[in-house]
Amino acid sequence: MEYRKLGNTGLEVSAICLGTMTFGEQNTESEGHEQMSMAFDRGVNFIDTAEMYSVPGRKETQGSTERIVGSWLKKTGLRNQVILATKVTGPSPNFGYISPDLGFSRKRILDAIDKSLARLQTDYVDLYQLHWPERKTNCFGILGYDHSMDNGWKDNFEETLQTLDDLLKTGKIRHWGLSNETPWGVMRCSMIAKEKGYPGLQSIQNPYNLLNRTYEIGLAEISIRENKGLLAYSPLAFGLLSGKFHRGADTPGDRINKFRQMARYNGALSYQATGEYIKIAEQAGLSMAHMALSFVLSRPFVTSAIIGATNTDQLKENLESISVKLEDDVVRAINEVHKTIPNPAP
C-alpha cells in the first residue's frame, strides 16, 4: 500500500480509502466486517462513512453504516490504527427524518457529531466533513452555476467553522474537510479560517473518475497550491468503469441496475465513453478497473481514492490497482477519449 499526507496534518492515509456506503443496504454487517478486515490486512488504514448512509438514503437504514463500522472497530480493537472519516448531512427535502434542522448550524453539528460518535463506538473521528453545501450551487451533476436557483441562503460559514474549531478543541474531531464543494466554497472557508485563526480544511471529497473530470477545471489547482487534497469518490462510476456492464457480467443487484433513480452514470454517452476506455485497457493488457483506478491515483491533486465493493472479489481487484502504473501512451489515449467525450457524467 502507498500512503500520502492528509492535507497539512501529520496523518498518513492509505492512497486507497475504503468506502462503506453499501453496508446496511447491499451488504450485511458480517459482510461489512469481512471487507474492513480484508482492506486493513492489505494496508488500508482509511475508512470513510457518513451519518446518512447506507445509500440510497432511507429512514429505515439511516445510520446503519456507522453502526456496522462501529461494531467492527469494537470487535477488532483497531480504532487507534484506523483513520476514520464521517460526514454531517446538508439540507435536503429527502432527509428530513435525520433532523428537522438539516444544515450546519452550531446546534445541528453538535447533535450530529454526538450521534455519529455513539454509532461508531468511539470518542473522536479523525476527519469530519460537511457532506454537501447548504446553499444551492452547481454540484451533483449541475455543471453551470445559476444564481437564480439561490434558496435565500445566509452565509453562516463563520458559525460553522467556529463550531468545528470548538469540536477540535474538545477532541471530538481531529480535522475537518468539505465534500461536494465548489472552488468558491473551498476558498471562502479557507479565507475565514485564516482570518479567525482556525485550523483550515484538510481535504475535499468530490466525485472524480474517467467519466467525470470536472474537478480538474477549478479545484485541482486549489488542491495543489493550498494542500487540500481530493478524496475521490466514485472512481469506478458506480461500477460502470469495471467493464462488467459491457461484458454482460452485471447482475440485478449491481448499483446501476438496482437503483435506477441514481442516474448519474446511466447515460448513453457514459456507456459510449466507457467502451472506448475498455479498448485502451485491452490494448494495454490491463483490467478496466485497474486502469480506471490507477488513473485517479496518478493525479497529483488526489490524496486517496475511495473504493466501494459489494463482495470481497471486487474489493481484492480494486485493492490490487495500487501496484498498477500507467504508461504515458495509455494516459495519452485516455486523454484523447476525454477530449472527444468530455465529462459525460458530471
Image: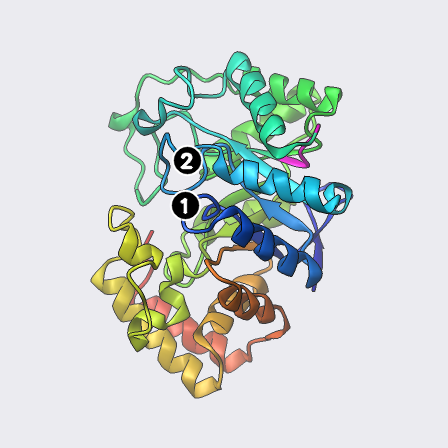
- Foreground: 281 or 255? 255
* Residue linked to disc 2: 61
Q: Residue at x 56, y 23 (%)?
A: 115
Q: Which amino acid type corresponds to the residue marked 2 in the rendered image?
A: Thr
State left or right for residue 340 relative to residue 170: left
The image quadrant that residue 242 belongs to is bottom left
| Type of secondary structure dominating the magenta stretch | loop
Estimate the x, y position of residue 103 in percent, counting from the top left. Answer: 44, 21
> In the visual, does 306 lie left or right of 210?
right
Q: Which residues make up the magenta segment?
A: 123-127
Above-or-below relation of 187 to 1? above
Q: Nearer the viewer, residue 311 or 171?
A: 311
Classify mark 1: residues with Cα within 10 Å, few (<14), some (14-19) or many (20+).
Answer: many
Count of marks overlaid on the render: 2
Q: What is the basis of the colouring in this image?
A: rainbow
Q: Is residue 235 visible?
A: yes
Q: Position of residue 162 (x, y in %)?
A: 62, 17
Q: Which residue is pictured at 38% across the width and 32% down the height? A: 60
The three-letter amino acid code for the residue at tag 1 is Glu
Residue 1 in the magenta stretch? The answer is no
